[in-house]
Amino acid sequence: MLHVSGFCQEDDTRPPKVNNFKEDSSFAAFNQYHVSVAKAQIVSLKKGALLVRLKTNANTIHRLKAAGNIDLATQVERETYLNNKTIMRAYRNEFNFCPVYFFLSDVSDSVKHRHLENIFVDSNLVVDPAINCKATFYLIAEQGTICESSLGLVSEAQAATAIERGAASKEVSIVVKNRYFKQLHKPFPYYQAGYSLKKYGDYVKRFNMLLTDFYTKNSSYVIPPEIMKYVY
């Protein structure tokens, strides 16, 4: 397996400290609306879909091949494939909060711009045109790194140009982002700690439970018009 870190900490990440980035306009409405936005996101996700981004490690593989390290490149390709299969199996076995779809990282731009045709992969990581997502709202989940976000509430109109400058915090099994690949905020359960692929099914199971619990508490929430620009 590819080397990964084994974080197994409890949920101890704090929400962004507004004073750290007080000159950023995205924090102007953060204290007032971030709880409402989280509620709107969970209600919308229940009716929508979760899209899981799978790594290709294409740049690493390309560099290895260009340097003549064919055997190592082949090893990375195989391990990437097996890791992605493990992640897919975990979601298919342990996740039922909403429909889930899988795509490879090289089509991330299509996901950002709602071009969801011919991008989703089947259980063999092959694009299957028959797999369609009709959801009008979706969030992105991936194995990755959470950060002390420099962004507060970014409207959809500003999302394409917003830049995350927050420092990396820790590697986690699951981090949830909006369709512009910006990390969400508490109280939405936006990440799941842990990074061992051997335990990935357990991580997804807990993530599914956290989403379910948060939705149960907020299932009757009616999204007010003033926060709709933050829910995408």
Image (cartoon, grey):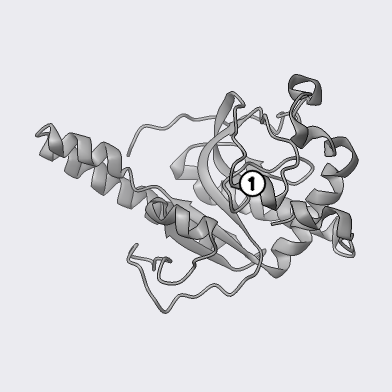
- Residue 176 versus residue 83: which sits nearer the camera? 176
Say if residue 22 shows up in the picture. yes
Q: As drawn, which residue projects farthest toward the bottom?
A: 130
Q: Amino acid at mark 1?
A: Ala
Q: In the image, what residue occupies the spot 72% across and 50% down?
A: 210
Q: Is residue 75 left or right of residue 26?
A: left
Place residue 58 in its image quadrant: top left
Please name the residue that numbered disc 1 is placed on. 159
Mark 1: give few (<14), some (14-19) or many (20+) Cα within 10 Å.
some
Residue 21's spot in the image, x, y percent?
74, 24
Q: Quadrant of the N terminus?
A: top left
- The image shows residue 229, relative to residue 127, as above or below, that is above
Side of 49 relative to 221 (left or right): left
Image coordinates for residue 171, horizontal then vertical, percent: 53, 32
In the depicted structure, whether residue 188 falls above or below residue 112: above
| Residue that protrudes farthest toward the top in the picture | 20
- Could you say where residue 127 lies in the image, as x and y percent from the top left? 35, 68
- The x, y position of residue 81, in whole percent, is 31, 52
Helix, strand or loop status at disc 1: helix
Q: Residue at x 47, y 61 (%)?
A: 102
The residue at the point 37 percent across, 52 percent down is 106
> Is residue 88 at least partly visible in the picture?
no
Q: Residue furthest left?
A: 68
Residue at (36, 32) in percent of width and height: 3
Q: Is residue 149 above or below residue 117?
A: above
**Left or right, 230 with reference to 92:** right
